[in-house]
Image (spheres, rainbow, N blue to C red):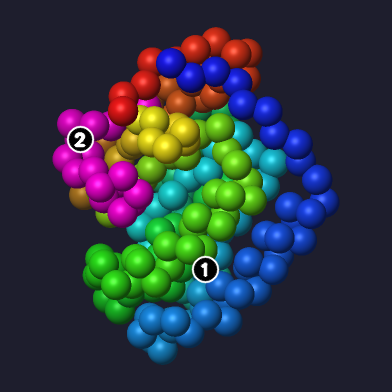
Amino acid sequence: MESLRLRVWGPKMSDEIDALRKTIISCTICELSKSRTNAVPGSGSIKTKVVFIGEAPGRTEDLQGAPFVGTAGKILSDALAYAGFTRDDVYITNIVKCRPPDNRRPNKQEMNSCRNYMQKELEIIQPKIVCILGNTAFGSLLNGNAITKNRGKIIKRNGQLYFVTVHPAAIIYNQDLRQVLKDDLKALSDIIDKLQKGIPVETNE
Ligand code: URA
């Protein structure tokens, strides 16, 4: 069971996120920095209740320096709108901030090199819930797998709530998942409403 957590928003948060963005944009810790066009820090509202975490930037994101702005991004935006969110209401980021060549999955070392950036984003924003998009983020954040079996669940780990759903890009290959993502995000919106009102929600450890 989980109820309301208090958080005070202040100007310091925007200074912190700006500083983090600058660090990410100039990062050269791993090899992906050599092949990228732009590093892609998270974007959106830092006053949000929910942070969405995907895998890694794709081609369009690499060119524009912003997360989820290509085909998968359009699918995500549609599902967000269906659930009553706008992109400006939420914060969207990735496990890895630079595009892996040929859109391959980021490897363990790349994920570990980027881990501090995502942790810092969460530390600054302190969302009520983190929405994990797909297996790579599920594995990296919670050591999870089998997204289709676990999607729609709320998981509590180290005091943080997570909600698991499919990756928007999976819909490009399986159209049946389009409604699954929409319904999951609607369920997420209802969960956030409950948390806001202090109504407990069922969690899995
Ligand atoms: N896929 C992701 O996981 N992240 C993006 O930003 C774009 C596509």
Magenta residues span 137-154
The part of the image, by quadrant, that contains residue 174 is top left
> Is residue 193 among what the camera can see?
no
> Is residue 3 among what the camera can see?
yes
Q: Does the residue labelled 2 lie within 8 Å of ligand 1?
A: no
Image position, residue 125 (x, y; %): 63, 46
Residue corresponding to mark 2: 148
**Residue 145 in the figure: left or right of residue 189:** left
Residue 10: mark: none
Image position, residue 12 (x, y; %): 79, 54
Residue corresponding to mark 1: 40
Say which amino acid is labelled 1: Val
Q: What element carries label 1?
A: loop
**Residue 6 in the figure: left or right of residue 171:** right
Q: What element carries label 2?
A: helix
Q: Vertically, is 118 above or below 65?
A: above
Q: Nearer the viewer, residue 72 or 199?
A: 199
**Residue 121 in the figure: left or right of residue 54:** right
Q: Is mark 1 within 8 Å of ligand 1?
A: yes
Q: Nearer the viewer, residue 184 or 47?
A: 47
Say which amino acid is labelled 2: Thr
Task: Name the residue located 64 percent from the left edge and 39 percent from the top edge.
Answer: 48
Q: The N terminus appears in which quarter of the rendering?
A: top left
Mark 1 burial class by Cα count in 10 Å: few <14, some 14-19, many 20+: many
Task: Name the residue located 40 percent from the left edge and 53 percent from the top edge.
Answer: 54
